[in-house]
Image (spheres, rainbow, N blue to C red):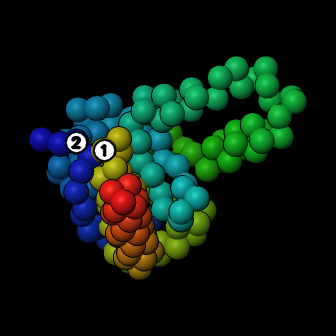
């Protein structure tokens, strides 16, 4: 089966926890035994990655310590990742707690429904309304890109 694919609905409980579906739990268990990193994305969602995947993503900042003193851009990137990332473990019940600041960032309220979206390397947790808007943007982008490809193809046949 494809890991970290599909969409699930989940409810946020009064303590800010969500319960993953058995499929998502199995993906995280197979990938990292439940050791995860929660990270706030600029798009307004919360990403959940296996810890190794997150570390691999962050290793792209080569020689970060040596460059941090001279690079405002690198310091901002490090600051953003440091402030908006948190190590966590998936509970035995398949739940994670979304910190209050992260829930506020993603406009996720206790008692509300969220959409858990597979991204092939982890999952994202979306406010249901924001997910609908993001899905529309992605579909519009794909259609526009397809039209541009067709136009370029037609112009090449003249």
**Residue 35 image point, x, y percent:** 39, 35
Instruction: Describe residue 76's horizontal placement relative to residue 139 as left or right.
Output: right
Residue 83 in the image: x percent, y percent? 67, 48
**Residue name at image x 57 percent, y 26 percent:** 59
Asked whether, in this view, residue 156 is left or right of residue 58, the answer is left
Q: Is residue 127 left or right of residue 5?
A: right
Residue name at image x 36 percent, y 60 percent: 158
37 relative to 128, above or below: above
Give the quarter of the figure containing the N terminus.
top left
Task: Categorize mark 2 by other alpha carbons within 10 Å: few (<14), some (14-19), many (20+).
Answer: some
The answer to which of 30 and 72 lies nearer the viewer is: 72
Q: Horizontal and vertical percent for residue 131?
A: 39, 71
Residue named by callout 2: 3
- 72, above or below 126, in the image: above
Neighbourhood count class around disc 1 (C-alpha, 10 Å): few under 14, some 14–19, many 20 upward: few
Q: Secondary structure at mark 1?
A: loop
Query: Residue at 47% across / 72% down in the picture?
Result: 108
Q: Nearer the viewer, residue 147 or 48?
A: 147
Q: Quadrant of residue 148?
A: bottom left
In the image, 59 versus 52, the foreground residue is 59
How far apart marks 2 and 1 lie (CA) works out to: 6 Å
Residue 18 appears in the figure: no
Q: Which residue is mark 1?
A: 120
Q: Which quarter of the picture shows residue 36?
A: top left
Placement of 152 over or under 107, stated as above or below:
above
**In the image, is 128 to the left or to the right of 79?**
left
Query: Are the residues at dot 2 and dot 1 in contact (C-beta closer than 8 Å)?
Result: yes
Residue 127 sits in which quadrant?
Answer: bottom left
């Amino acid at each position: 089966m494809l890991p970290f694919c599909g969409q699930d609905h989940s409810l946020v409980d009064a303590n800010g926890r969500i319960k993953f579906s058995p499929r998502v739990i199995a993906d995280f268990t197979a990938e990292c035994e439940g050791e995860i990193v929660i990270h706030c994305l600029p798009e307004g969602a919360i990403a959940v990655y296996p810890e190794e995947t997150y570390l691999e993503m962050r290793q792209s900042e080569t020689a970060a310590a040596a460059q941090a003193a001279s690079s405002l851009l690198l310091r901002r990137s490090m600051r953003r990742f440091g402030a908006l990332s948190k190590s966590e473990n998936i509970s035995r019940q398949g739940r994670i707690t979304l910190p209050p600041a992260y829930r506020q960032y993603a406009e996720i309220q206790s008692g509300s429904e969220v959409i858990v979206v597979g991204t092939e390397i982890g999952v994202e947790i979306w406010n249901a309304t924001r997910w609908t808007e993001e899905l529309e943007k992605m579909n519009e982008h794909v259609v526009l890109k397809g039209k541009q490809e067709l136009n370029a193809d037609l112009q090449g046949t003249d």
